[in-house]
Amino acid sequence: WATASAASRWPRASEEVAVLLSGGVDSSVALRLLHDAGVRCRAFYLRIWLEDEQAHASRGECPWEEDWACASAVCEQAGVPLEAVSLQDEYSQLVVEYLISEAAAGRTPNPDIMCNSRIKFGAFLDKVGRHFAAVASGHYARSTVPTPSCAMVLDTRATRSAQDRSAAYATAMVAAHGDASKTSVLRERELEARVGQDGSGVASAELPAPAQLLMSADPHKDQTYFLSQLRQDQLERVLFPIGHLPKSEVRALAEELQLPNRQRKDSQGICFLGQLNYDDFLRDHLGERPGPVFEFETKQVIGTHRGLWFHTVGQRRGLVPVLTNAFAAKGPWYVVKKDVENNALHVSREYTAADKSRNAFNANSLNWLSG
């Protein structure tokens, strides 16, 4: 796709929404809600998995093939075109290198946050998504978006099913984006559209504010934390079609729509690292650096860790193998401190005790979503 101009490859892109399709249920339902609401959609599957790493971890199998097959089946059913976009180099440079450097520095990285801000709504938006009216994803989040309209009111009180309400919601979101070419110059005006789960309707109001990131209707599945590094120019181009729905209703819609992948389980892996074992991944890139494990209260050495990057503060799982037999059975043990300078790990059986330092923390790389 890089060799063809956007105008020739996607002649009606300004009238379409680019939908990020992973092959999972959430993004598939997001696609169908937009499509069934009459929105012109074009689906994109991002090839960001690490071929060599994946092949090694899966003993030569290709775990991404199932994702592609599911995405293809969903698009074929809906009659929506699907394209694969390779962003492997960008992912390696912008996410994997960050992950490795943060782990080596003794911090706990979050590659999913960087994958969203630097890849899905970064590299993809810059290379492909910017040509479309908006980019949609299956994240559990909501947003307010700038609009060229002075006001817009959609009444959905007559709708009854979850699918009807969701279709009206999808229409409202797309309409709120308006002309994509005008989005960046209309940030002083926005439309906030909220749809009640009971189908009571959509309330709208003009607010002199930029696009906002709002929590989803499902507090247990909310993903706004993973979207917290989005810039204003990214957020104002993004749609979250399922953000107003609880997970149970998304699953119900998948059944109602008879999606080919409706029985598929949710992914639990790190963004696009798929089936890779995280510790093995770190070991391949950082190796091992053994050091002492201290009991926090007594300062007694009670074991040997294989590398601080394999542990994070608050961790309980995986500590038994690094402790001596005399202490392993005395748990549960928790990581309470990582001393990077001395390559020492401090653990305790009294994680919630009052003597543990927790009245202050350091923060950096703050991101103000409002711009």
Image: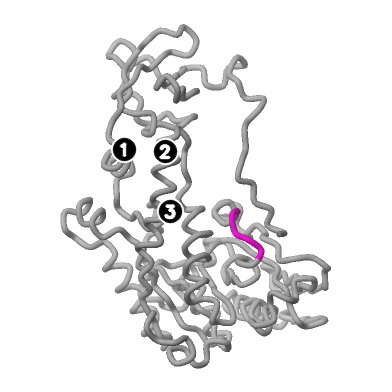
Q: In this orientation, which residue lies closer to the viewer: 73 or 212?
A: 212
Most foreground residue, 324 or 203: 324
**Residue 169, quarter of picture:** bottom right
- In the picture, the disc for residue 103 is 2
Mark 3 and mark 2: Cα distance apart in space: 12 Å
Horizontal arrangement in the rendering, residue 116 relative to residue 291 (left or right):
right
* Image position, residue 328 (x, y; %): 33, 17
Q: Is residue 145 above or below residue 294?
A: below
Q: Secondary structure at mark 2?
A: helix
Q: Are marks 1 and 2 in contact (CB under 8 Å)?
A: yes
Badge 3, how many Cα within 10 Å: few under 14, some, many 20+? many
State the residue position of label 3.
Answer: 95
User: Which percent across, then down, holds residue 357?
Assistant: 60, 20
Question: Residue at point 50% right, 60% down?
Answer: 118
User: Relative to 263, is 287 on the left or the right?
Assistant: left
Note whether 352 is above or below 158 in the view shown: above
Magenta stretch bounds: 228-232
* Amino acid found under the numbered disc labelled 1: Leu
Q: Is residue 176 left or right of residue 67?
A: right
> Image point 69% across, 81% down: which residue?
182
193 is within the stretch colored magenta: no
Tag 2: amino acid:
Ala
Q: Residue at x 46, y 22 (%)?
A: 339
Label 1 belongs to which residue?
A: 286
